[in-house]
Amino acid sequence: MSERQKRFYEEHPEEKIKLSEVSRRAWGQKEAKSIKKALSKFLKRQVTDEELSNVFSQNQEMKTKMQAFWNKNKWAKDKFSKLMKKSWERQKELDEMGLIYEPFYTANLIPKKMQEKIGRIMAPNNKNFANIPTSLIPDIRELTDNPNLVTPAGSIEMKETGKIIDDYFDANPNEQDILADTLDMGFAIAIKELAEEKVKNMDKYPAFAEMTVYWQDTAVQKWKQHTPTGIDELTKIYSTLMNICVANNDLASAKKIDKSVESAYDLVVNENPKVKDLTMLNVVSALVQMGIVERNIFFK
């Protein structure tokens, strides 16, 4: 790195972070394994992604050895250049989303089958139709302290998709009810399955306890009072559950929520209108039996 480049990065710390992130992503690719293997052999010691990623923390000896390695192994240099190019392209996409780091998890509020249905009706010629933030679905990043952790699913090349989704729900208000029932039931299914799995693996789901308390205080209370939970409130519940997962570094629970929402959509679409109440009753009863939900949930 030239003195001019060093000055630039010292004057622009955000670019310094970005370069380290690009480098980290490149070294983390599967295609980089052969390079790291050759480099370890060249240095006669095992190298780590961490020391390779942060070029600013490398001492002069390491920089000299790296240069010697690149000079001696043109194949590795060419291969890594391609990985860096690919990583910079990804960084450009993140820049457009207002992010520096890769998201912790790409949340997927609208079930995939519903997305496909909307795409077929509203954008039949758009093969890349995807779910992105809309006025109906608040940007989850607004509800978390760290904007880089959770972001709604979507393709940044398809920014017009948000309007398509809004138009679809405006023209088909009953679909909002289907989505609301899907989310409500999906959360219940997720909590029950997480409770059953947590018995086998106590450490795998660190967000479970906090998620369950929040779910009881919101969705379960509405169900107990026979009050429908609206789509706005359910999107907030979804966002909060995801952010609890983020705060506890619990990727498994985040994935479980989305998987359960996908399953719930099939039940809502294919079964009778009573399926949601029956599912909620079965879930809450099971959680009472497990001692996770208090028994007085059934009493006013």
Image (tube, helix red, strand yellow):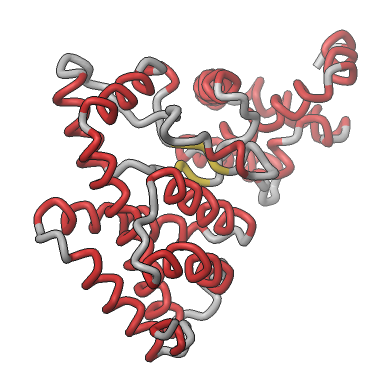
Q: Position of residue 129 (x, y in %)?
A: 27, 24
Q: Does residue 184 lie above or below 118 as drawn?
A: below
Q: Nearer the viewer, residue 15 or 158?
A: 158
Q: Does residue 5 lie above or below 284 as drawn?
A: above
Q: Position of residue 205 (x, y in %)?
A: 51, 70
Q: Outermost residue, top direction? A: 4
Task: Tell me which corner region of the image, top left, top right, bottom left or bottom right, holds residue 101.
Answer: top right
Is the C terminus in the top left, top right, bottom left or bottom right quadrant? bottom left
Left or right of 217, for residue 156: left
Q: Is residue 187 visible?
A: yes
Q: Does residue 266 lie above or below 296 as drawn?
A: above
Q: Position of residue 257 (x, y in %)?
A: 39, 58
- The residue shown at (80%, 17%) is 1
Task: Tell me which corner region of the image, top left, top right, bottom left or bottom right, holds residue 206.
Answer: bottom right
Q: Does residue 77 lie above or below 186 as drawn?
A: above
Q: Position of residue 218 (x, y in %)?
A: 49, 63
- The residue shown at (80%, 27%) is 64
Q: Is residue 84 visible?
A: no
Q: Nearer the viewer, residue 266 or 8?
A: 266
Q: How many marks?
A: 0
- The residue shown at (74%, 42%) is 51
Q: Nearer the viewer, residue 58 or 13?
A: 13
- The residue shown at (10%, 59%) is 271
